[in-house]
Image: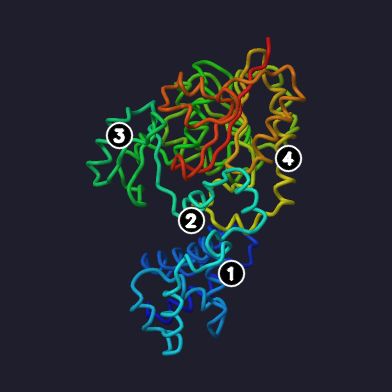
């Protein structure tokens, strides 16, 4: 595609994404479906440009003010990836001069908000939590996430999976914390990689893998993944159960549960039972009250721990949406707790960085439910042979899992664990 046509295509897609009516990845995917003539290089350029703008929106919008023409075109020029000579071949002489001037601006010359590229409310909340680590956190959130895999323990051991991936020409290393994790270099396609096709490995962030370890599901148990989504953690839990017992995958979205089916087929699991529910008080949940050994509540949340993958979330979330999520999280947690039999384990988790969705929800649940006792996360991780468990925890005695992208190179995660008193 000619550089000018590609630039126009970028500007058009950016305008669609910045309506913020749908997640950015969904808008980009729809654009590609509607424009099937776009080749792999064009799609990569479009996607990279969009995500660069979402990551550095405030900085790029500030620089764009000094240019002329369509706002979307100016943003596309500033964020366009690769060699500048390519994009300059599509620009007028005044645009080339303007771009050179923008490229010469150093981050040290920018105002704070143009360096961190966060809405004010979110920047304030994160500064209060991490203090002097704020700049390091922001830098990590503005980098693309690595591609992590989880070894399916039913089919392979990690050393064997690593050997298989190396034979397929991939650069892969063991993750530092999860005993089942593998980290790939770059973002290779896995569709024809034997280890993936045969179900020996599955895509899953290292932090997400630790949540299944916290649940510690056993052979023959009755287990519920309360907000299963597309089932990444469901698959990890089923493998930990050695394909025995009964594992319910609940979700309010039948569409998300449908995405679990091909993953289930690859995994070799037969103990998973996907169930679409209407809400957290669904009658199908009530019938299981007091019968379940372990429940994972990976609750719907702001997703602000996943900004490396979904930078649009920082522009789509607000203090009001976070407050509403916290109310829903408490309601879901209360309903899920009713499922457990005496001695059963409850794990609450989010992929949020915010205290309002994490410690605050955990503390409120603990105060309202004296029949549950907190279990220190650090001791569970230690028993699961996780390296340096104390480095992954927060709270008195390692009470909570607290993962940060800048510290642990994972998505941001929180988890709390309780045991129902006999």
- The tag on residue 142 is 2
Left or right? Give the position of 360 relative to 179: right
Residue 30 in view (yes/no): no
Gap between marks 3 and 4, in whole Å?
A: 39 Å
Tell us which disc is closer to us: 3 or 2: 2
How far, Cα to Cα, is label 1 from label 3?
41 Å
Q: Is mark 3 on a helix, strand or loop?
A: helix
Mark 4 and mark 2 in contact? Answer it, CB < 8 Å: no
Alpha-carbon span between mark 3 and mark 2: 30 Å
Q: Report the front residue among 227 and 180.
A: 180
- SS class, disc 1: helix
Q: Which of marks 1 and 2 is nearer the N terminus?
A: 1
x and y percent of residue 326 in the render? Answer: 71, 41
Judging from the image, what secondary structure is the residue with disc 2 in?
A: loop
Residues at marks 3 and 2 touching, judged by CB atoms closer than 8 Å: no
Question: Residue 308: x and y, percent?
Answer: 49, 52
Q: Residue at x 64, y 67 (%)?
A: 19
Instruction: Classify residue 99 by image quadrant.
Output: bottom left
Quickly name the residue at label 1: 16
Q: Distance between the Cα atoms at labels 4 and 2?
A: 29 Å
* Label 3 neighbour load within 10 Å: few <14, some 14-19, many 20+: many
Q: In this view, does 139 lie above or below 131?
A: below
Is mark 1 in CB contact (under 8 Å) with mark 2? no
Q: Mark 4 points at which residue?
A: 328
Please indicate whether residue 44 sits to the left or right of residue 368 in the image. left
Q: What element carries label 4?
A: helix
Q: Which of marks 1 and 4 is in front?
A: 4
Q: Do the residues labelled 3 and 4 touch (CB within 8 Å)?
A: no
Q: Is residue 66 visible?
A: yes
Residue at 41% x, 36% y: name it.
266
The residue that disc 3 covers is 161
User: Which residue is nearer to you in this view: 394 or 260?
Assistant: 394
């Amino acid at each position: 595609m000619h550089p000018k046509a590609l630039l126009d295509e970028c500007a058009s897609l950016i305008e669609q994404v910045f309506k913020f009516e749908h997640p950015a990845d969904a808008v980009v995917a729809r654009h590609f479906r509607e424009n099937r003539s776009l080749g792999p290089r064009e799609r990569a350029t479009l996607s990279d440009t969009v995500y660069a703008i979402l990551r550095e929106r405030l900085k790029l919008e500030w620089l764009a003010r000094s240019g002329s023409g369509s706002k979307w075109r100016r943003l596309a020029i500033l964020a366009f990836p690769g060699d500048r000579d390519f994009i300059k071949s599509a620009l007028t002489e005044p645009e080339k001069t303007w771009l050179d001037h923008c490229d010469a601006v150093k981050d040290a010359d920018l105002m704070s908000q143009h360096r961190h590229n966060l809405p004010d409310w979110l920047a304030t909340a994160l500064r209060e939590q991490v203090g002097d680590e704020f700049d390091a956190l922001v830098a990590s959130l503005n980098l693309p996430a690595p591609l992590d895999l989880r070894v399916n323990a039913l089919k392979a051991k990690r050393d064997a999976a690593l050997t298989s991936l190396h034979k397929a020409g991939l650069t892969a290393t063991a993750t530092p914390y999860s005993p089942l994790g593998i980290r790939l270099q770059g973002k290779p396609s896995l569709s024809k990689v034997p280890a993936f096709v045969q179900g020996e490995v599955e895509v899953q962030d290292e932090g997400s893998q630790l949540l299944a370890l916290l649940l510690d599901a056993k052979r023959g148990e009755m287990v519920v993944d309360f907000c299963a989504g597309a089932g990444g953690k469901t698959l990890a839990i089923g493998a930990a159960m050695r394909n025995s017992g009964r594992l319910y995958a609940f979700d309010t979205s039948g569409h998300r549960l449908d995405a679990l089916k091909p993953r289930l087929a690859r995994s070799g699991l037969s103990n998973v039972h996907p169930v679409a529910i209407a809400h957290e008080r669904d009658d199908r949940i009530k019938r299981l009250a007091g019968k379940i050994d372990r429940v994972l509540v990976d609750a719907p949340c702001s997703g602000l721990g996943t900004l490396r993958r979904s930078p649009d979330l920082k522009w789509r979330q607000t203090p009001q949406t976070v407050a509403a999520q916290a109310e829903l999280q408490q309601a879901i947690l209360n309903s899920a707790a009713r499922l457990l039999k005496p001695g059963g384990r409850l794990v609450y988790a989010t992929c949020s960085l915010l205290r309002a969705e994490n410690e605050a929800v955990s503390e409120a649940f603990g105060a309202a439910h004296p029949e549950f006792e907190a279990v220190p996360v650090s001791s569970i991780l230690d028993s699961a042979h996780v390296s340096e468990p104390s480095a992954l925890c927060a709270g008195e005695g390692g009470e909570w899992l607290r993962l940060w992208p800048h510290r642990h190179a994972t998505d941001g995660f929180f988890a709390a664990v309780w045991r129902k008193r006999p």
